[in-house]
Amino acid sequence: MDTRIPVLEKRCLVLGVSGGIAAYKAADLASRLVRAGAALEVVMTPAASEFVRPLTFQALTHRPVATEMFSLLQDREIGHVALGQRAALMIVAPATANTLARLANGLADNLLVTTALACRGPLLLAPAMESGMWHHPATRANLETLVGRGAFVVGPETGRLASGGVGEGRMAEPGTILEAACWVLGRGGPLAGKRVVVTAGGTREPIDPVRFIGNRSSGRMGFALARAARDRGAAVTLIHGPVALEAPYGVDTVAVASAAQMKEAVLEVSDRADVLLMAAAVADYRPRVAAEQKIKKEAEAARLELVRTEDILALVAERRRGGAGPAVVVGFAAETEELLRHAREKLEKKGLDLIVANDVSAPESGFETETNRVAILDPRGGVETLPLLAKREVAEAVLDRLLPLLAPR
Ligand code: CTP
């Protein structure tokens, strides 16, 4: 399923592709940007079109791809100037050592650099080159110049290089570059200046060194919330249990395992936060003791004594009563029956500003799915039932509802 990303949707982005082997990955990036809803224009250096044909990008973007500096667009605009002026953001991926040098010096002898010079929006660079070139003082100096001028840099990563060696210089993955673009474009959004803490995933309560009590939460809902808040300009801290998900770019992440660790992490940051979105499935009970050694199967039957964990939202509510804590707190209720009644009880008991009620009895909604069907309840009795949506869309809907709660009273 293609999920539109609001911060990219209908925005004019220019992707400048320069001539390195990573140019083939730029095709994947172009495809992802288009699927996210961006109006994407591609410009290529002559060297890039030795690696990947312009036709590839043309087919992906459904737009002509400019490689030639001395040509006019259909409507006789001067191509690079018009493109640069329209662009909300220019991404250069891959940015080779040569292109970085040209950009740093304003050496406008190809379409990519002339477009960058004409560009009024920010510049996001995804360098890709051999390790030695990346660490060369000339490249370092060029990059410093560009960053000093306000350019953003994503990557490079360490890994296998085209030469066969391993080192720093691999272009960041297309998914990471796309996320970096979201982060750059999101700055100055409606949550700019706000600190948002999101919790995600389930916790693990140790039984012994190899076993734990866990739950089916995948962390997807919380990760989607973190990305959506980032895309609206918030400074986001994502506190998550063990998950199999990529950390969102531009978000501070804190990995925890048990409910007690999650509590510590949340209390540590929530006093300075404006918003707490508590999407984690925190264990309500833990084994009274965690055995130091692996428990052997000696007896026919075994008993596990469980004790209650602390309720993190209850502790946050207590702090809020004392005048500390976040201005807005949103809880989640995962239920298998009597969804709205249970959710309203939790909203009241935990002193929440909103609760997102989630029927986890349906296979397409709740744990380990990409989609969710939720209702959002407020303390004034309001209930809004949303249709089955991608978790990303649910996240957008939740953030839409919390914006008015943050407005100065
Ligand atoms: N929560 C919490 N601390 C806990 C348990 C839950 O802060 N120890 C939070 C969850 O992150 C969620 C909300 O409380 O935002 C509701 O969680 P849920 O487990 O559905 O509710 P409980 O209060 O634990 O009620 P019950 O398990 O009886 O349904």
Image: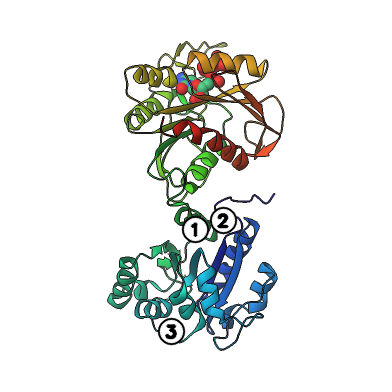
Secondary structure beneath dot 2 equals: loop
Q: Is mark 1 within 8 Å of ligand 1?
A: no
Mark 3 or 2, nearer chain start: 2
Q: Is residue 230 visible?
A: yes
Mark 2 or 1, nearer chain start: 2
Residue 8 disc label: 2
Q: Which residue is mark 1?
A: 181
How many other residues sit within 10 Å of disc 2, few (<14), some (14-19) or many (≥20)?
many
Three-letter code for the amino acid on which mark 2 is drawn: Leu
Image quarter for residue 382? top right
Three-letter code for the amino acid on which mark 3 is drawn: Ala
Q: Position of residue 114 (x, y in %)?
A: 47, 80
Q: CA distance from mark 1 to mark 3?
A: 24 Å
Q: Which residue is mark 3?
A: 108
Q: Where does the C terminus fall, quadrant-wise? A: top left
Q: How many marks?
A: 3
Asked if marks 2 and 1 touch (Cβ < 8 Å), the reply is: yes
Q: Is residue 283 visible?
A: no
Q: Position of residue 12 (x, y in %)?
A: 57, 64
Query: Closer to the camera: disc 1 or disc 3?
Result: 3
Q: CA distance from mark 3 to mark 2?
A: 28 Å
- Between 358 and 190, the residue placed more toward the observer is 190
Q: Is mark 2 within 8 Å of ligand 1?
A: no
Residue farthest to the bottom, as pictured = 70
Q: Residue at x 33, y 29 (%)?
A: 271
Q: Position of residue 250 (x, y in %)?
A: 42, 50
Query: Closer to the camera: disc 2 or disc 1?
Result: 2
Three-letter code for the amino acid on which mark 1 is drawn: Ala
Q: CA distance from mark 2 to mark 1?
A: 8 Å
